[in-house]
Amino acid sequence: MTRKELIGNIRKKKSFLCIGLDSDLNKIPHFLMEENDPVFEFNKQIIDATHDLAIAYKPNMAFYESGGIAGWKSLQKTIDYLQNFEDVFIIADAKRGDIGNTSRHYARAFFEHFKADALTVAPYMGKDSIEPFLEFENKWVILLALTSNQGAFDFQYIQNRESGKKVFEEIIETSKQWAGPDKMMYVVGATKAEMLSRIRKIAPEHFLLVPGIGAQGGSLEEVAKHGMNKDCGLIVNSSRGIIFASKDHDFAEQAREKASELQQKMEKLLM
Amino acid sequence: MTRKELIGNIRKKKSFLCIGLDSDLNKIPHFLMEENDPVFEFNKQIIDATHDLAIAYKPNMAFYESGGIAGWKSLQKTIDYLQNFEDVFIIADAKRGDIGNTSRHYARAFFEHFKADALTVAPYMGKDSIEPFLEFENKWVILLALTSNQGAFDFQYIQNRESGKKVFEEIIETSKQWAGPDKMMYVVGATKAEMLSRIRKIAPEHFLLVPGIGAQGGSLEEVAKHGMNKDCGLIVNSSRGIIFASKDHDFAEQAREKASELQQKMEKLLM
């Protein structure tokens, strides 16, 4: 998907909502266990109930990998199903990254095999670990910059003796030379809304993928205040708050309800 | 596998060799394509020919993921096959890492489902992204500290204004408080042999997994000189230099030849 198409979908749906498909087999409604592929059936019903409200879906690889081969099959079917919706941006949340030769294989796995639009990538190994992901047309790298967990304080805030910048700022400064805002985005945790302003100064045009709304405690209004740019520039993710809104037969309906609440707030923030 | 067992295997085999199973479908001998599962057949023959010379095998996830479901099946069969050898340490080279809830699923995938002994983990998200991997008895975290690629210079060498230490040193200093040398190892690229001395001062007892011997240009003697401790403390990996030594019918024999050359050098260095 191109940047122009992504922005078009945000305008059309009046939403910058991403739904995180953290579809834990042990947390999905129990009655789905009768299905041949409970996780796919769960995802399908969530997608059917919400695709007019969300501009992106983000399957979280860990929840599929922990199921082994069966998990990978559910993932494949889910991403294949998402291909039916032209106005949906598919983010494989995999946080991969390795030396060039290896990253090239990860790129193939997620961009050619699974046909995701974007992949979350870990920055620690630097430029040659990211470049193979940038070679695919209309595919995106979403680089971890600042995360929303407690452990973010361990290394991401280390201040560079030479430049005075923090590591997460160095990562954005440096990596924005590798690809422009048409191919690169950054992960910025919502629990650090005040940091969004600093990041916006470094990367005014890039989209930011913001996890941590809902279960992780971030505020949507704060995120929009500090992070929005003229093209919106935000993709805000909610996972558990939407997909596990109910564990009963009305789970898809309740997911839609929660997604709709967020979409309506977003519509106001986009005005 | 316990630390004691690992050290016992090093003494028994007079080797600290790890063979990297970067088993690229496009690089394995062509005649194997007739097999039902060419990648597994390739791995099996490599393992059969080398398991008395190597103390560890390291399947690199990317090369299996790029094959989709078929790739994951080859991986599963390979790890299952490795279980037959009690004196072999199985490292899943996956470089995972995410918020706690997600890391827990990755831990299950690699420690419960695939039954690997160790997993390579990316440090960027800090303590709570690593802890779920440390909860499994006799399973290991191998944390990325200093890598052997060019991009290592982008962020790993940033010097902390407060402590004067570089980021990779901070990662080792901080993380060694999370787990001792019986559960944690570090990845340290062989092309930076002089850095091994600095790392040995910070972590005198930890095992170091050293990639970058062979194709990536590192010297085994330099690594041993700077990195060895009283328990050996090193696992040195070679991938392409061994597994792709020949692309003909003698590929397993040639792999053994290359592995044997390294084992003999290691035997001298262990004296």
Image (cartoon, coloured by chain):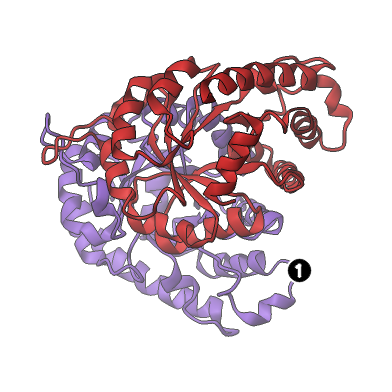
Chain colours: A red, B purple
Image mark 1: chain: B
Measured as percent of width and height from the top left, residue A25 is found at: 72, 28
Which amino acid, mark 1? Asn
Q: Is B228 located above or below residue A135 in the figure?
A: above
At label 1, counting other C-alpha atoms closer than 10 Å, the crowd grade (few under 14, some 14-19, many 20 or more) is few
Q: Residue at x 55, y 16 (%)?
A: A215
Quarter-wise, where is residue A68 in the image? Answer: top right
Residue B179 placement, left or right of A13: left
Residue position marked by numbered label 1 in the rendering:
B36
Measured as percent of width and height from the top left, residue A170 is found at: 25, 41
Quarter-wise, where is residue B39 in the image? Answer: bottom right
Measured as percent of width and height from the top left, residue B113 is found at: 64, 40
Quarter-wise, where is residue A99 in the image? Answer: bottom left
Q: Residue at x 33, y 67 (%)?
A: B216
Residue B118 placement, left or right of A166: right
Q: Nearer the viewer, residue B173 or A166?
A: A166
Residue B239 placement, left or right of B178: right
Residue A234 appears in the rendering:
yes
Which residue is at the far front?
A271
Q: Nearer the viewer, residue A103 or B169?
A: A103
Q: Is B223 located above or below residue B215 in the figure?
A: above
Q: Residue at x 34, y 40 (%)?
A: A203
Measured as percent of width and height from the top left, residue B63 is found at: 55, 60
